[in-house]
Every structure is written in structure tokens, then in C-alpha cells.
Image (cartoon, grey):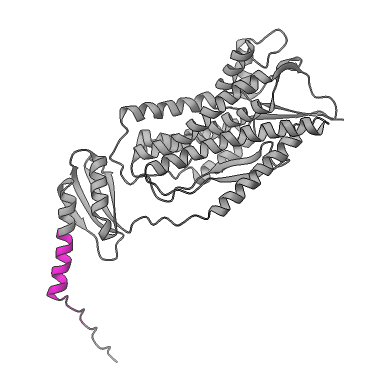
Amino acid sequence: MSLPPAPAPPTPSPAAEASAWSAEQRLLALVARVMRIEGVVWGGPHDAVRARFVGRVLGDTAAAYDRLWAALAPWDLTPLFRADPHGRHVVLLVQGRPRPQPSRAWVNALLFVLTVLSVLWTGWVSHATGDPLTTAKQALAFTAALLLILVSHEFGHYFMARHHGMAVSLPYFLPLPAPLSPFGTLGAFIRLKEPPRNRRVLLDVGLAGPIAGLVVALPLLWLGLRWSRLGPLPAPAPGQALMLEGNSLLYLAAKYLVFGRWLPAPVGGWNGLDALRFVLTGRPVPWGGVDVILHPVALAAWVGLLVTALNLLPVGQLDGGHVLFALLGQRARRLFPVIVALTATLGVFWSGWWLWTFLILLLGRRYAEPLDMLTTLDPTRRAWAWLGLLVWVLTFTPIPLQLFMAGP
């Protein structure tokens, strides 16, 4: 039995053809206002990319993008500015516009309250002296200093994003009380609800947090060290545990400025090779020497420097990844294996780096790619980007914490 022939597809009416032609012509005219068009490929009605234009964007690319973005709003299209391998400019018109979802502020508020309680409890446990009043004062000092740094960091991101008109969530603080964490928190993050407009915006938002946190952490570190004192560094007695904080270049310099010597200091002082080994690997520990007995504010400031360094790791969705991508564009991806090798190697000396290596492998390949990739950094922002990478080098702590436990 033969099947009946398939019906012929309906022939578009002249009105429909004219309407489609008119839409393409109007889009062509809109793009021609900002671009010298050398070629165009039109997508189908169900394609995500409505059209692809090749040529050269006219004048300032950031201003051209803003004009085209506004012109395409009635069309529900998003323009993307890219470059092809031959150096030509490419404008893609993508179906849909970013539609940020409203936030639930009560979630942010609840997490913040829980983080305050978590840090306060951890400060109480860490600074227990046997005197409840003294312990309470030290726990409050630690909590206030640490949260001031974290709040400054996150709202640096938030207010810079709002300055650029980006939809962004309020900070999400992450509580993790003792004994699960020695600090009472895993830090905090904000969520960008739409892609950054260009690499300048990406840099501003990514770098604003670490700079704001550092502006608060540095005076707190100075005050905390002034309130600290020097004391012996005895090896832990049987049944005791001792935790030593790691050293970054900035932290070492701050201790030198306050106390006039490199600390911790072994008996007889450091020689160059042992000092370098201690900073990079935490060995040899200068037992019997002198170290700083940290005031709670100094400890909170040290945590602030550590948070700054971890956030500025130049990879993926971290602040440092934003800075590097804003500076180098797609070339930033080439440093991914370098950072993985660095953290994996340091994991030999501090196992926490293996967790970071796993997280980088899991999430670090994704970068916050702006809508406009043609607009590069201006000279001032380029200097700020290099400053951000320098801050990472100065605050990076190869061995953040060491726990020593003596047997009974």
C-alpha cells in the first residue's frame, strides 16, 4: 500500500515576507549606526543568534555598545561584541535580554545573623581565658573586626555593581562555627544577576571588594599588632595543641614595622635560606624562639588578609579571575594550569590547598565573560589591575595554618 504524498509546505504570504524583510532591514540599519558592516549572516526563526555581523565598530566601542544595547531593547535582543581570529569585529544579536530575578533579603539577613553568632562563638572558644568577662571582650573584639572586614569587602562589590547599574544580590554570609572552622565563617559572596557590560565594569566590580576589605584590614592589623605582645614560642607540651598562622609578605612587613624584627624569630636569628623555607613550607618551625602573641583584632586582620589573598587567586569566578580576565581577556585562561599546579603543590605542605585545587578544577574554568569583549581597559584601570595582582602576591600565604599536637 502506497502512502499519500506529503502536503506541500505553506507558501509564505507576501505580507509575511515583506514583514520579515522589513525586520531584517531595520536591524541592519540599527547595527550600521555603530558598525561598518562587511558581511552579515541571518539566523533562522528558532536560532539563539538572530544575526551575525562582521566588520569594524565605529568610534569608541563602549559608547557604541551602549547605543546598540538601548536601540535593541524593543526587539528583546542582546548584542554581543566579539573579535574573530582575523582581528575583525563581530556583533552577534542574541535572542532575549537579561531578566534579573528579585532577591529574598530575609535569606541574606538570616545568614548574616547566623554568621555573627558563629564568629562570636568561635571567638569565645578560641580566646577562652577562664575569666568570662575577659573572654567575652576578646570574642567581641575578634567578631567586630573580622565582620567589619568581610562586610567592607562584600559591599565594595555591591556598591560598585550598583554604580554601574548592574543587578546584584546582597551579600550571602556563610557561617561555619568551631570546631568546624577556626574563624567561624567561610566568608561571603554576592551573586551577579546579569553579565558585566564590558571588561572595565568587570574589573571595577571584581577589584572593589578586595580593595575595600584591605583598606579596613590594614589599619586594624596595625592596631591589633600594637595591642599584641612578644612571647616565647615553646613546642607544645604533651597533650597540648598549638596553631601557628602563616606569613605573607605583607604580614611579615607589618610585624617588622611594629616590632622592628622579623617574626617569628628563632634563637640566634634567621639565615636567609631557612627564612625562605619557613615562609614557603612552614619548616623549620623556630621552637624556643620569639613570636607575636596576637591580640584578637590582629588575628581578625590576619584572617582578612588571608581572605583577600584567596579571593584574588587569578582564576575563574574568583575576584582575581575577574581582574585577570579584564586585563588579558581570553588569554587569562592560559594561566589556569599554572594556578592548579601551584595549589596542588602547596597541598603537600597544607592539605587545605587540595580542597582549593578541587574547587578550582570544578569551577575555575568558567570566567565572567562580558557582553562587550572589544572594549579594553583604559590606562588607569590597567594600572589598577596590575595593583590588584600585586596585592595578591603580597597577601598570598603559602601555608595559612599549621596545627601541632603533642602526644600524651
Task: Note whether 84 is above or below 320 in the view shown.
Answer: below
The quarter of the displayed image where residue 378 is located: top left
Task: Note whether 249 is above or below 197 in the view shown.
Answer: above
Expressed as whole percent of the image width and height from the top left, the position of residue 246 reads: 64, 25
Expressed as whole percent of the image width and height from the top left, the position of residue 408 reads: 87, 30
Q: Residue 316, can we see it? A: no
Task: Note whether 274 is above or below 83 in the view shown.
Answer: above
Compared across the picture, whether 164 is left or right of 149 comes to: left
Task: Note whether 227 is above or below 67 in the view shown.
Answer: above
The quarter of the displayed image where residue 115 is located: top right
Which segment is the magenta one?
8-25
Extreme-right residue of the structure: 408
Q: Nearer the viewer, residue 115 or 98?
A: 115
Q: Residue at x 41, y 49 (%)?
A: 167
Q: Residue at x 85, y 27 (%)?
A: 238
Compared across the picture, whether 151 is left or right of 135 comes to: left
Query: Which quadrant, please, contains the N terminus?
Result: bottom left
- Magenta span has 24? yes
Expressed as whole percent of the image width and height from the top left, the position of residue 162 reads: 41, 44
Secondary structure character of the magenta stretch overall = helix
- Magenta span has 133? no
Q: Nearer the viewer, residue 3 or 262?
A: 262
